[in-house]
């Protein structure tokens, strides 16, 4: 059941990422591209959870989970929010960070990963550089999302409220990752629906 729940959450995130990508092709609004990329990363992170739950975690599935879920999702959400607010420099900075995070995720040394429970990054990665980069990316991305949402909540109350709820649920899912794949997958699915609806309202 756990692999199916995680796989379902991955498919849902990917489906909603595709919907945002279609809207971007029509409108060419850069925030839609960033939000779509964030949901693709979210989907890949959930897919890695399904992989780990079904076949046992290994170095490859952990790298995919950590890079996409730990390094890219929140930062790309933040890039989208900044672009929506008219901060154009967010696009090149986001591209540079994304390339750096992917390269780091491929190159960094990982302590052997086994088992079916979601691995604790502190047990498999050194603090510097991988965990520090993930912390900085997550904190800056989350602050950007929350800051833009709160500053513009009077103009777009429903969309921003949905995004704030989605970020809160996603954070709760991260905190609940120690409970297991099934619980985390449910948080992932709920968060991606809230975020998607919020993006549609804001755009």
Image (cartoon, rainbow, N blue to C red):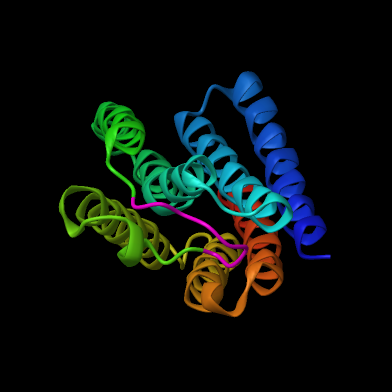
- Magenta region: which residues? 111-118
Position of the C terminus by quadrant: top right
Q: Position of residue 35 (x, y in %)?
A: 52, 41
**Image location of residue 107, percent across then percent down:** 29, 32
Residue at 38%, 64% in the rendered image = 146
**Left/right of residue 150 with respect to residue 180 in the rendered view:** left
Quarter residue 76 falls in? top left
Closer-to-camera residue (154/190): 190
Residue at horizontal 70%, vertical 32%? Answer: 18
Asked if residue 203 shows in the view, the reply is no
Left or right of 151, for residue 77:
right
Q: Is residue 147 magenta?
A: no
Task: Please name whichever residue, 158 or 145, is drawn nearer the observer in this view of the structure.
Answer: 145
Estimate the x, y position of residue 44 in percent, counting from the top left.
59, 42
- Locate the N terminus by quadrant: bottom right
Q: Position of residue 33 (x, y in %)?
A: 52, 30
Q: Characterize the magenta stretch by its predominant secondary structure.
A: loop
Residue 171 position (above or below residue 8): below
């Amino acid at each position: 059941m756990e692999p199916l729940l995680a796989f379902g959450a991955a498919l849902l995130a990917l489906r909603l990422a595709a919907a945002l990508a279609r809207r971007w092709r029509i409108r060419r609004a850069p925030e839609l591209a960033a939000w779509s990329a964030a949901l693709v990363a979210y989907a890949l992170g959930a897919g890695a959870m399904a992989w780990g739950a079904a076949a046992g975690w290994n170095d490859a599935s952990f790298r995919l989970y950590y890079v996409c879920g730990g390094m890219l999702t929140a930062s790309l959400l933040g890039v989208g929010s900044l672009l929506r607010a008219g901060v154009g420099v967010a696009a090149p900075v986001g591209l540079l960070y994304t390339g750096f995070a992917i390269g780091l995720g491929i190159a960094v040394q990982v302590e052997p990963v086994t088992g079916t429970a979601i691995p604790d990054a502190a047990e498999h990665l050194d603090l510097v550089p991988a965990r520090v980069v993930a912390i900085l990316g997550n904190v800056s991305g989350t602050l950007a999302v929350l800051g833009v949402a709160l500053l513009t909540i009077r103009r777009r109350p429903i969309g921003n409220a949905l995004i704030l709820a989605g970020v809160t649920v996603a954070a709760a899912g991260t905190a609940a990752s120690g409970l297991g794949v099934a619980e985390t997958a449910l948080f992932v699915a709920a968060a991606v629906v809230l975020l998607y609806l919020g993006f549609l309202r804001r755009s």
